[in-house]
Amino acid sequence: MTVMPDKKTEYEESATSWRELDPEEVKKGIMAKYPPKVARKRSKHFVVNKKKDEQSYEPIQANVRTIPGIISQRGCCYAGCKGVVMGPTRDIINLTHGPIGCGFYSWLTRRNQTDPSTTPDGHNFMTYCFSTDIEDKEVIFGGEKKLKQAIQEAFDIFKPKMISVFSTCPIGLIGDDIHSVTREMQEKLGITIFGFSCEGYKGVSQSAGHHVANNGLFMHVIGQDDTVQEGEYKVNLLGEYNIGGDEFIIDELFEKCGIKIISTFSGNSSVDHFRNSHTADLNLIMCHRSINYVADMMEEKYGIPWMKINFLGAKSTAASLRKIAQYYGDQKLIDRVEEVIAEEMVDVEKAQADVQTRLKGKLAMMFVGGSRAHHYQELFNEMGMQTIAAGYEFAHRDDYEGRHVLPSITVDADSRNIEELDVEKDPTRYNPRIPEDEMEQEERHGIKLKTYDGMMPDMEENFTYSIDDISQYETEKMIEIYKPAIFCAGIKEKYMVQKHGMPMKQLHSYDSGGPYAVFKGAINFYYEIDRMINSKVWGHIRAPWEENPELAAMYANE
Ligand code: CFM
């Protein structure tokens, strides 16, 4: 039975009293309810952030199978491939080969926005749901014929530049060869058509689907158009999906600074941008988890270096802009970036000072995907709030502890299932953008390339938690014990959290809000959280079990 906290006053009190709790004891108490084998496993995913030595943190277990029976936040491989990486591109027809439910439930549920007016043909297929709608007949006799028909039909109606096909669980189980079908249809129709073996059961989460999608883009799309575009500082933005319009305002800010985006993977994107992306000078990685594979492969094949940036939080935005300017080392760009930062920070600082009067010292928890649980802490810090616990659904150890742990990550049966491409220098297009010795040293003008330190170093030691693939039970316990002022996760968690009488902000879809990126988005976010936390409505919520803790029921026929 959930023990309900005494509303707001208790939350406010908890903002100062949580330091008296011993986090190791809290963890022990939570684990004690599990059967011993489950407790042993979950303990490795539930860690108190602590340094092991100068460079490294106490390790966390991640990217392994969820224990059967546990209510997890995770999604599937198909979701990561079709929904996350490929979904936000407006002029690709993304065709789900599978039962209608897979297509339907991945249709427009992620708020990735797009602006078709910027591509000449104005194509936007994102509002459609394309599916082969396989049924029992195809499961028994095979679905390849239906797939061919569906590709033909989509081509006849929409005349797209590219069609990609996504395998769902039953397709993998019945053994349809989507790749031979797409090859045949590509030859017949003369446009780019290829398939993704992203069956939902592959790997342990969405993360497998990101990797499959990255491989497909790299093999079939990137590098097909060598047109050199105008612009002095040309970059690709990797791992930015334009949720709630974030990419729009990043683009606007870049334009102000004189930086040109060749391609965004894949928010507000077009297949034409992807094809041309190998002509950029530099890859900027926003979400490391979903797309670091593309960055690594583009470096090897085309000689384009990459660096990690973050445009969530005003401080991180300023630091990221400075990093880009420093990388180029061009005084004109350095000065311009400083001017823009100074201009934007006036309103940001005003907003920070204002919301801090109401939010300082309050606690937040966030459990999201594979990147946002780190990035959004910046915004909460700027409001004077403290993130007490954070975690990912499907990130890998490097997203928690930093990329230096990569060599120590063991490959298991699930990760071995995902193809690793053999990448070589392109015979004509390889062109190292910086001297090769700097590429090897992974440093340019004092700016570190190819590194990501992960989430742990940005969380307070000994008091805060990193919790991987958190379960519903652990979520409820953490809420009861710490009574955070706000909890951030996704739609599956939203109503459970609200029933505890506390505000819940969706950090996947932003509910109906956004954009939250760069300086303007930061101000938006501060006021959104301020409004949610200081709303009086939470004090009025009484869950039914508070009055009647014993729930009784009877059979209808009694
Ligand atoms: Fe990257 Fe994302 Fe995320 Fe992600 Fe996602 Fe998302 Fe996410 Mo939802 S690509 S890892 S698979 S930042 S859809 S835009 S919000 S879980 S934290």
Image: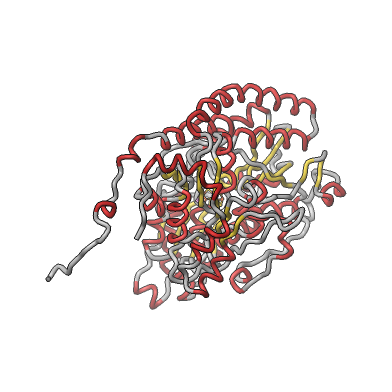
Q: Nearer the viewer, residue 111 or 22?
A: 22
Which residue in the rendered view is the most extreme toward the front? 20
Determine the residue positioned at 40% across, 54% down.
492
Position of residue 319 relative to residue 284, above or below, is: above
Determine the residue positioned at 58% across, 61% down.
212
Can residue 547 be seen here? The reply is yes
How many labels were placed on the picture? 0
What's the colour scheme? secondary structure
- Judged left or right of residue 124, residue 544 is left
Q: Quadrant of residue 386?
A: top right
Q: Quadrant of residue 207?
A: bottom right
Position of residue 176 relative to residue 513, above or below, is: below
Image quadrant in which the C terminus is located: bottom left
Q: Position of residue 274 (x, y in %)?
A: 62, 47
Q: Nearer the viewer, residue 45 or 210?
A: 45
Q: Position of residue 79 (x, y in %)?
A: 48, 58
Image quadrant in which the N terminus is located: bottom left
- Judged left or right of residue 241, residue 506 is left
Q: Nearer the viewer, residue 389 or 240?
A: 389
Q: Position of residue 481 (x, y in %)?
A: 46, 53
Determine the residue positioned at 64% across, 37% down.
316
Which residue in the rendered view is the most extreme toward the left? 558
Can residue 297 be seen here? The reply is no
Q: Position of residue 502 (x, y in %)?
A: 39, 44
Which residue in the rendered view is the most extreme toward the right? 437
Q: Nearer the viewer, residue 15 or 386?
A: 15
Position of residue 409 relative to residue 285, above or below, is: below
